[in-house]
Image (tube, rainbow, N blue to C red):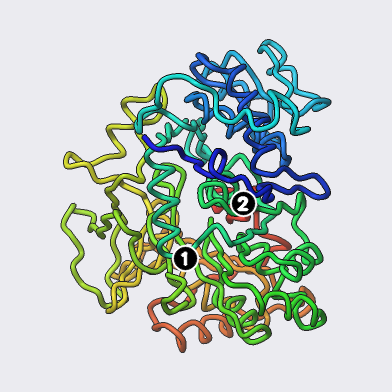
Amino acid sequence: MSSLFPALTDDPSGRSALRFGERSLTYAQLASAAGAVGERVRGEGRVAVWATPSLETAVAVVGALLAGVAAVPLNPKSGDKELGHILGDSAPRVVLAAPGDELPAALRELARIDVEVDGEAGGEGAGAPGGAPVDDETPALVVYTSGTTGPPKGAVIPRRAIATTLDALADAWQWTGEDVLVHGLPLFHVHGLVLGILGPLRRGGSVRHLGRFGTEGVTRELSTGASMLFGVPTMYHRIAEALPDDPALAKALAGARLLVSGSAALPVHDHERIAAATGRRVIERYGMTETLMNTSVRADGEARAGTVGMPLPGVELRLVDEDGSAVEAYDGESVGEIQVRGPNLFTAYLNRPDATAAAFTSDGWFRTGDVAVRDPDGYVRIVGRKATDLIKSGGYKIGAGEIENALLEHPGVREAAVTGEPDADLGERIVAWVVPTDPENPPTESELADHVARRLAPHKRPRVVRHLDALPRNDMGKIMKRALPS
């Protein structure tokens, strides 16, 4: 297989590869530091990486990949129980960490390798460690799912999936080595690590990581040469809130080549506020741990709010009804579960042949658990998760996502989540969980029901409205509906 990162050996120009705050590495320095890590972990089955937002994390993962060793990124915020499960399941013998990082007790049984990033480890330009070529199917990462329905499962992601996903995104986004990416995403998820770090490195471009996300950092980086911004909806919501009083931020965003949101749906209201203030539209893409990226709006396509575009090159996508039959209609209304097939898919859940078998159909389609509709031109519109967001009410199948977007267009609604609950007459009734803009004067149930009915259809209006101070969210900003009050 060709190298995942050709620029590590092919770039003599001294260009910046990685920058975290004031610390940075050129491609030659990255090749040296990562090559040294690779030599130290060669032959290990899997290595744990204490995945802080740092140069050391990026160097550790690249070093493991150069050596053909699978990296297991660990969330530094994981509790003892979750961390113990991941370590017991993946059985790494080594943990890679930044010098000085204090590791929890669960990791102290492992041999520790401190990752040096001064550009001298291994000698300037040491590059990739030698050895036999690494096969396409060799595991590159084991990334653990969020574990919302049980202990986290380790998705084994092969090198083939990383390469094909990043190359498909390069096609869709016209992503080149001239691009400079800025983001503040965590590095233990696919979004921040694979797209946000490995993506620029595969293209031969550079990445500037903010450490902690802030609109000031976005303004600074986009005003000084960065061309792309990756974020999650929570980040874009903060940008939308700040724009009216921050002309420098508006100017910086207006000058960006590409604004990309992912990991959850970006509310239409935030799309429109950003577009109105900057003249630029955020594009969305759709992926998950097990599949990396499946679809995206193209850089040269229509950035239509509420959609995640078309399947990426090499990805097959279909919608399937509950009885297993294909949903053929491209009418923006017919709901089905998304199933995908292609070289972007993971290999298996580590040590879970039962879960792996259950995740795939007999002919190799992966069951995503996400439900969607397709617009007449083929654009995919996610309407939620099959387990929590598909509501069967009055004989209709309704996706929670479109109702949430409609609610967010109401000026009295700051945040919204929609669920279904049992109803003797309807089967399920639609329940709206709302964080009001003004807690002292929240919108009424009838007001919100009429608002949704006018925008969508009467059968999609909420029958119950419950007010909250905040919605429960995970590290990536996704609403955790199972954590809503019962």
Q: Quadrant of residue 181?
A: bottom right
Residue flagged by tag 2: what amino acid is it?
A: Met
**Which quadrant of the figure contains the N terminus?**
top left
- Would residue 426 be seen by someone viewing this image from the given angle? no
Residue flagged by tag 1: what amino acid is it?
A: Trp
Q: Farthest residue toward the front?
A: 12
Q: Position of residue 300 (x, y in %)?
A: 43, 76
What is the total number of numbered labels drawn onto the structure image? 2
- Disc number for residue 226: none
In what element is the residue under mark 1? Answer: helix
- Quick check: 112 above or below 425? above
Q: Residue 62 versus residue 416: which sits nearer the camera?
A: 62
Camera-nearest label, 2 or 1? 1
User: In the image, what residue occupies the spot 56% across and 83% down?
Assistant: 446
Q: Position of residue 199 (x, y in %)?
A: 53, 50
Q: Position of residue 155 (x, y in %)?
A: 44, 34
- Would residue 192 be seen by someone viewing this image from the given angle? yes
Q: Quadrant of residue 134?
A: top left
Residue picked out by circle 2:
476
User: In the image, what residue occupies the spot 47% across and 72% down?
Assistant: 299
Check contact, mark 2 vs mark 1: CB within 8 A: no
Residue picked out by circle 1:
173
- Left or right, 384 with reference to 184: left
In what element is the residue under mark 2? Answer: loop
User: In the image, what residue occupies the spot 56% across and 27% down?
Assistant: 64
Labels 2 and 1: the sequence-earlier one: 1
Q: Residue 204 versus residue 77: which sits nearer the camera?
A: 204
Report crowding for label 2: few under 14, some 14 to 19, many 20 or more residues within 10 A (C-alpha): some
- Left or right, 80 with reference to 144: right
- Quick check: 140 above or below 385? above
